[in-house]
Image: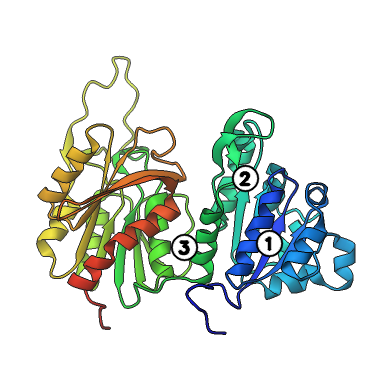
Amino acid sequence: MEQSSDRPFTGKQILLGVSGSIAAYKAVELLRTLMREGANVSVVMTDAATRFVAPLTFEVLSRRPVATDLFAAHQEMLHLTLPEEADVFVIAPATANTLAKLALGLGDDLLSTMVLTASCPLIVAPAMDGGMWDHPTVREHVTQLRSRGVTVLDPVEGPLASGKIGKGRLTDEQTILNALAACLLPKRDLAGQRVIVSAGPTHEPIDPVRFISNRSSGKMGYAIAQAAQERGAEVLLVSGPTALPVPPGVRCVYVETAEEMAKVLTTNFRWSTLVVMAAAVADFRADKPSHQKIKKQAGGWKTLALAPTEDILRTLSRQRTKQILVGFAAETNAVLVHARKKLTEKDLDLIVANDVATKDGGFGSDRNAATLITRDGADTPLPLMSKRELAGRILDALQPLIKRVAPPARH
């Protein structure tokens, strides 16, 4: 069915899950918006959700029966048919209990059972009270879900049902709609591009058991690789040591040291049209690594002679023909000053500057805030957001450069 610009979700099948949060009433307005956007929406509610909003409300607005009971639904096989028909499954609001069930793979009600049978993209918008969002168990469940490719939207801070002020309110409707659009209306603006993304730290050996490294998790680079692949690019991910799964459809070469990373990147550089250097490459290596484990000494370790590693971005910049080069400046002070200097010295097209000393946006976090700085000096500050969303914003910012500098490559 042809889509219109004012009804972009026309013909799309959306499965809306509602769990037992006070924010369940906001799902009513979300349903109305999705219907106005042209979507066909089926609603599934947990028993607790029906205590906050009557199923009849959703039934009247969606013009479809609302699924609530696992055993009644089982008679019509709705736990199978509704997920099979869905283009996307969104749960809004999702309680801490619902997050736990999804992370652990439990299926003790209709909603959690449908998640287990669904093969479409899953978007989860949590809502909870007090300090629940920051509880270690909840954070672990969120991390598990995100590692499996589930889009988990952060709740926002504000007044909660208990009267407290904290992070736990259901995110705004536009954020949910943007996440749905990313699944239902994927961009293919990188079709024909050949993208190299570096990610993670490097390990520079001191001896066979010790090495020099940094706190990089690789999450930002992996998010960029995944986003580029989903937008149609052919992607080579050059990864330092991480525990992250390789995004589907992405070719990955693992390296350990800065020297190994430099070799892989320079070897494949001419193949590429766009290089995003998100890796946190060690600036120094041990000058003379020991072939044997260095034993502990009573007097301590007095000195460790260091030598600089190769400046990979500078090397690539000198070799480029029409490639677009993107760098990262992970700083702890004078962030924009250092980033602009790096952009100029290494002749980059764009640099992503971020303060890694911030509490929620440093190394290892699932979120990041950054400023995008282009060659012409334009600054675009971006607020704290998921690294997946930031990856999309970086690729968006590159579109004018891609059209002007690097037309789609021909095989």
The image quarter in which residue 136 lies: top right
Measure the alpha-carbon separation of dots 3 and 2.
20 Å
**Quadrant into which the N terminus falls:** bottom right
Question: Residue type at mark 2?
Answer: His
Rendered position, 368 above or below 239 = above
Q: On the rendered structure, is 247 left or right of 237?
A: right
Provide residue 244's location: percent of width, then percent of height. Answer: 47, 53
Examine the image and state in which quarter residue 308 appears: top left
Between 188 and 104, the one lying in front of the other is 188
Marks 3 and 1 close (CB-CB < 8 Å):
no
- The residue mark sitting in front, 3 or 2, is 2
**Quadrant of the image for the C terminus?**
bottom left
Amino acid beneath label 3: Pro
Quick one: label 3 or label 1, which is nearer the N terminus?
1
Which one is in front in this view, the residue at disc 3 or the one at disc 1?
Answer: 1
In the picture of the structure, the residue carrying the numbered disc 1 is 16
Please say if 407 is above or below 346: below
Residue 39 at what x, y percent from top left? 62, 72
How packed mark 3 is, by other alpha carbons closer than 10 Å (few <14, some 14-19, many 20 or more), is many
Q: Secondary structure at mark 3?
A: loop
Judged from the image, the secondary structure of the residue bearing numbered disc 1 is strand
Q: Is residue 48 left or right of residue 210?
A: right
Reading the image, the residue beneath label 3 is 247
Q: Amino acid at mark 1?
A: Leu
Check residue 141 in the rendering and tell me which mark sits there, or answer none: 2
Q: Is there CB contact under 8 Å for labels 3 and 2?
A: no
The disc, 3 or 2, on the residue closer to the chain's N-terminal end is 2
Percent coordinates x, y for residue 275 in the rendering: 25, 62
